[in-house]
Image (cartoon, rainbow, N blue to C red):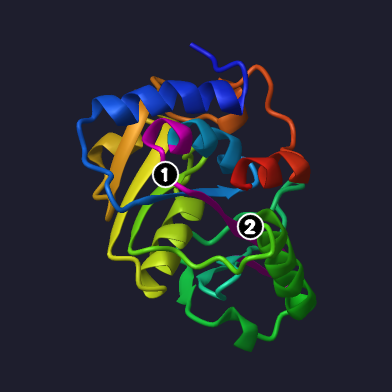
Amino acid sequence: MFFENRTDAGKHLARTVLDSGRDFSGFEVVGLARGGVPVAEPIAQALSLPLKAMCIDDLLVDGSKLVCTTSGHGLLYKLSRPVEGTQKVDMAPRWIEDSSQLELTGLSEFLSELQRRELMYNNGQAFQPGIKVLLVDDGLVSGTTIKVAVQALRQQGVEEIVVAIPVVLPWTQNAKLDFELITWRVSTMKNAATGMFYFEFGDTPDQQVMAATA
């Protein structure tokens, strides 16, 4: 089954979250901006919980790929030389607690833009997670983005994290995940891009994110 769009995926996932029987008292819902926020919105509404947006993005420069949050926490990958037009990523990344100390071209501007967007998405309020977070994204393929988000939240003092994803790949069933995972569906496809599960998977406008977190 395919989702009509991210909101449709969120409605399906909201029912799964409710049916889990888990007590979400004291939690807040955090959507990974931008695509995870419209998925998170129906969940926050179903649970009557506040919704916030957390920004994570990639910086590809100087033979490196940095995946980080506005807090500066992230993973640093080393890239190999292009092979037939593609760049291979070293899958043994280094965890970075303060990416602002790295010497990467354009890093300062990248972090400033990430912080500007997160502030905008949260209606001018700096993102400060509560002690319990239900973290939502629109998909989980390699797991890099969720791994960064979870570790960054923990280093920001979050005591309990539950991750909710509409659809995940089979490898997650046997993986030793360091977080509780709730999903509406486990795909039978071993390799897939997140967008393959959606009929509509365009960019999420800033206005939609801000309206959801208002």
Asked whether 104 or 120 is in front, the reply is: 120
Residue at 74 percent across and 31 percent down: it is: 202
Question: What secondary structure is marked by label 2?
Answer: loop
Which of the 4 image quarters holds residue 207?
Answer: top right
Expressed as whole percent of the image width and height from the top left, the position of residue 21 reads 20, 31
The residue under label 2 is 122
Q: Are marks 2 and 1 in contact (CB under 8 Å)?
A: no
Of callouts 2 and 1, the N-terminal one: 1
For the question of whether residue 95 can be seen, the reply is yes
- Please provide percent x and percent y for residue 211: 68, 41
Pick the residue in front: 125 or 112.
125
- The amino acid on which the numbered mark 2 sits, given as a three-letter code, is Asn
Q: Looking at the rendered structure, which numbered label has been put on residue 49?
A: 1
Q: Amino acid at mark 1?
A: Leu
Q: Residues within 10 Å of mark 1 (few under 14, many from 20)?
A: some
The region drawn magenta spans 44-67
Residue furthest to the top in view is 1
Q: Position of residue 122 (x, y in %)?
A: 63, 57
Say above or below: 125 vs 182: below
Q: Which mark is residue 201?
A: none
